[in-house]
Image (tube, grey):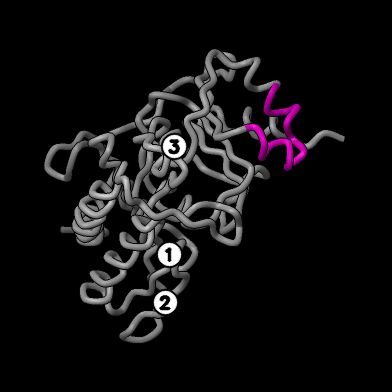
């Protein structure tokens, strides 16, 4: 296997373990939910999934570090290196705790500041998405039942299906008017939120998505999937995305139009 195929094979193993843990706790009557200092929820499933992934990585990739949403950064046990895994054990925890099936485990491999492989597993939807640099992007129930995916060819914003997470963040960002102009001017708009809009973008089911702020664990796994599917992801100023960054994801053809539409006004 070439390139990052071995790493993606491991990511599927990690996702299998994560899926078993999270599905056992989904809609459980005794699910424990606490509030983190940033006022976002965390469930016992979040922590259990991240612990399981970390334990497997410590055995299988001792030369790689780990960064997870719940337990922070851990250095590689075999010494410092430029590779590390980024884990969001349950992206969409608010959905998870309310019984909404749109949530997923996000697993990414970074080399330095660059995400080079990513996997998104949404077991309640029965679907995964994954990609490695130079390997293309795929979606399916598992690694052995998959199809290659590709972004759409829509090239006019007025013909686009546009996705966003919520409007509150855009109000806080000072660009609510710009976002509303987009939503009223496109062919269709939907607020899928979290990982799901980006995966629909990679599949060509919608054409653009934007969010005013995300953390590295929210986005690292998404970047290889969208870009290997032919799309483009930047921040609101058109720069490559980084930790705690705004995000615009498009099929590439619409990117400059979305950047212009969301630009700050004098």
Q: CA distance from mark 1 to mark 3?
A: 20 Å
Give the camera-side residue of 163 and 25: 25
Q: Residue at coordinates 42% horizontally, 46% vertically from top-left?
A: 222
Magenta span contains residue 170: yes
Pointer 2 with pointer 1, Cβ within 8 A: yes
Instruction: Name which of mark 2 and mark 3 comes first in the sequence.
Output: 2
Question: Which tag is nearer the camera, tag 2 or tag 3?
Answer: 2
Callout 1: helix, strand or loop?
strand
**In the rendered view, would you say 241 is above or below 233?**
below
Residue furthest to the right = 266
The reply to whether dot 1 and dot 3 touch (C-beta < 8 Å) is no
Q: Position of residue 164 (x, y in %)?
A: 55, 31
Query: Residue at image x 72%, y 28%?
Result: 178
Count neighbours of disc 2 (C-alpha within 10 A) and say few if under 14, some if 14 to 19, many if 20 or more: some
List x then y, in percent, for residue 106. Answer: 37, 52
- Which comes before the other along the chain, label 1 or label 3? 1
Residue 28 visible at all: yes
Specify which label sits upstream in the sequence, 2 or 1. Answer: 1
Q: Is residue 124 left or right of residue 178?
A: left
Residue 38, percent from left and from top: 60, 57
Q: Which residue is mark 3?
A: 198
219 or 44: nearer the eye? 44
Q: Which residues are magenta?
A: 167-180
Residue at x-position 31% and y-position 59%? 49
Return the mark for residue 74: 2
Q: Nearer the viewer, residue 255 or 207?
A: 207
- Which numbered tag is attached to residue 68? 1
Q: Is residue 250 shown left or right of residue 222? A: right
Give the Cα distance between marks 2 and 3.
Answer: 28 Å
Image coordinates of residue 122 in percent, x first then y, are: 30, 41
């Amino acid at each position: 296997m070439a390139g990052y195929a071995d790493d993606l094979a491991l990511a599927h193993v990690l996702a299998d373990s994560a899926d078993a843990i999270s599905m056992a706790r989904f809609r459980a009557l005794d699910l424990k939910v606490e509030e983190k200092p940033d006022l976002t929820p965390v469930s016992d499933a979040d922590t259990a999934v991240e612990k399981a992934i970390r334990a497997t990585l410590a055995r299988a990739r001792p030369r790689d570090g780990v960064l997870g949403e719940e337990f922070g950064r851990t250095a590689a046990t075999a010494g410092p290196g430029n590779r590390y895994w980024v884990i969001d054990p349950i992206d969409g925890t608010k959905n998870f705790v309310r019984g909404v099936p749109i949530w997923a485990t996000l697993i990414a491999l970074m080399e330095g500041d660059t995400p080079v492989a990513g996997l998104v597993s949404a077991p309640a939807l029965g679907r995964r998405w994954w990609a490695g640099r130079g390997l293309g992007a795929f979606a399916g129930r598992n690694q052995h039942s998959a199809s290659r995916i590709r972004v759409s060819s829509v090239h006019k914003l007025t013909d686009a299906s546009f996705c966003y997470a919520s409007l509150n963040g855009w109000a806080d960002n000072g660009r609510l008017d710009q976002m509303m102009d987009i939503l009223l001017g496109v062919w269709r708009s939907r607020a899928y939120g979290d990982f799901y809009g980006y995966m629909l973008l990679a599949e060509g089911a919608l054409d653009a998505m934007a969010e005013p702020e995300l953390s590295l664990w929210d986005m690292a796994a998404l970047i290889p999937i969208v870009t290997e599917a032919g799309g483009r992801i930047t921040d609101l100023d058109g720069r490559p995305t980084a930790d705690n960054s705004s995000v615009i994801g498009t099929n590439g053809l619409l990117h400059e139009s979305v950047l212009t539409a969301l630009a700050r006004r004098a």
